[in-house]
Image: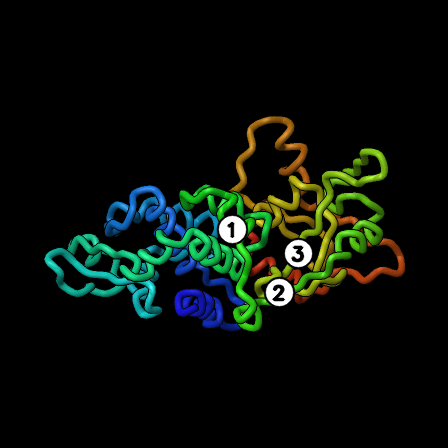
Amino acid sequence: MEWLERVTRLRRWTRGGERDPHKALLLLYAIGQLQRTGFKPVRFREAEPALELLFAEFGPPKLAGPAYPFHHLASDGLWEVAAAGGRPSPGADRDLMTAGDVHGRLMPEFAKEMLADPALMSQIVRILLDTNFEPSLHPDLCSASGLMPEIAQTAAIAPYLKDHLPRAERDPTLRQKILVAYDCRCAFCGYEGWIGNSVIGLEVARLRWWAFDGQDDLTNCLCLCALHHRLFDKGVLGVVPSGKILVSRHFVGTTETSRRMVSELNGKGVAPPQTGFARPDVRNVDWHTRQVFRGPARI
């Protein structure tokens, strides 16, 4: 219970709806290292390149370096940091950390209990994912952190933690509502597909993420195909209140297919829901632009 509650408190300290997943990403990386190599210190200078890639791919558009969470995670009681020779950490200065051969590690008892209880490890990973990221990103996050993607899929959240996590229950009818509102078509490309009586390849994409108080309703959701949903959650695609699609300048696609399916969406209109259904709220559009979309947009 103690470790689960400490991990849960990492999310509580996020303020004003801003994404700050860097401690969570460091923990996921450290747990991946624990799985692969056992309980060993993580040297900052060796881990820095991998952490920078994790932060760039899954963090908010405002980039942050690994030094800050590497040092400050120790204050949460899950991680400890020291310099060479057992000296204390020199702080969150990247150059001082590198020069001082700083290393960190999970708290020994924390690591010991996770290694002895795979179910606990799965719960820890599940909390870190659910409280910081949209579900479409979870498999990629596990892979990038060195974790097996299925580690969190079967993890049950302990009942006593549900009151401290984002809303534990989601609307099971949401997908059907969104499909009806958007006439079973992707709002970006118009894709529709069926097999028998089942709609395939279309998903619910949230503007404001569920972990950050995003509501399960039409004012916060779009109907997108699986490809454009993933790109939307990764910040490659965005929207503006006027109803135009944004494409990040950071996106690189060299084939005709990638240009047609992604690059050429820039500036095109988002298909609105059918008459009588609520449109996305501009406040949710703004949240996605600030916290997810990797600007600047293409001109």
Q: Quadrant of residue 102?
A: bottom left
Residue at the disc numbered 3: 206
Residue 112 x/y as whole percent:
31, 56
**Mark 3 / mark 2, whichever is N-terminal:** 2
Q: Secondary structure at mark 2?
A: loop
Specify the quadrant that holds the C terminus: top right
Question: CA–CA distance between discs 1 and 3?
Answer: 21 Å
The residue shown at (26%, 62%) is 80
The residue shown at (48%, 57%) is 123
Q: Could you tell whether 142 is left or right of 48 in the image?
A: right
Question: CA–CA distance between discs 3 and 2?
Answer: 16 Å
Q: Secondary structure at mark 3?
A: strand
Q: For mark 2, does the 10 Å Cα neighbourhood hold few (<14), some (14 to 19), or many (20 or more) residues?
A: few
User: Which mark is drawn over residue 168?
Assistant: 2
Relative to 184, residue 275 above or below: below
Kind of residue indicated by mark 1: Ala
Q: Is residue 158 visible?
A: yes
The residue shown at (79%, 49%) is 271
Residue at the disc numbered 1: 152
Kind of residue indicated by mark 3: Arg
**Mark 1 / mark 2, whichever is N-terminal:** 1
Residue 52 x/y as whole percent:
37, 49
Task: Tell whether label 2 touches label 1 (CB within 8 Å).
Answer: no
Relative to 70, residue 6 above or below: below
Relative to 120, residue 15 above or below: below
Kind of residue indicated by mark 2: Ala
Residue 201 x/y as whole percent:
72, 39
Q: For mark 1, does the 10 Å Cα neighbourhood hold few (<14), some (14 to 19), or many (20 or more) residues?
A: many
- Residue at the far right: name it: 275
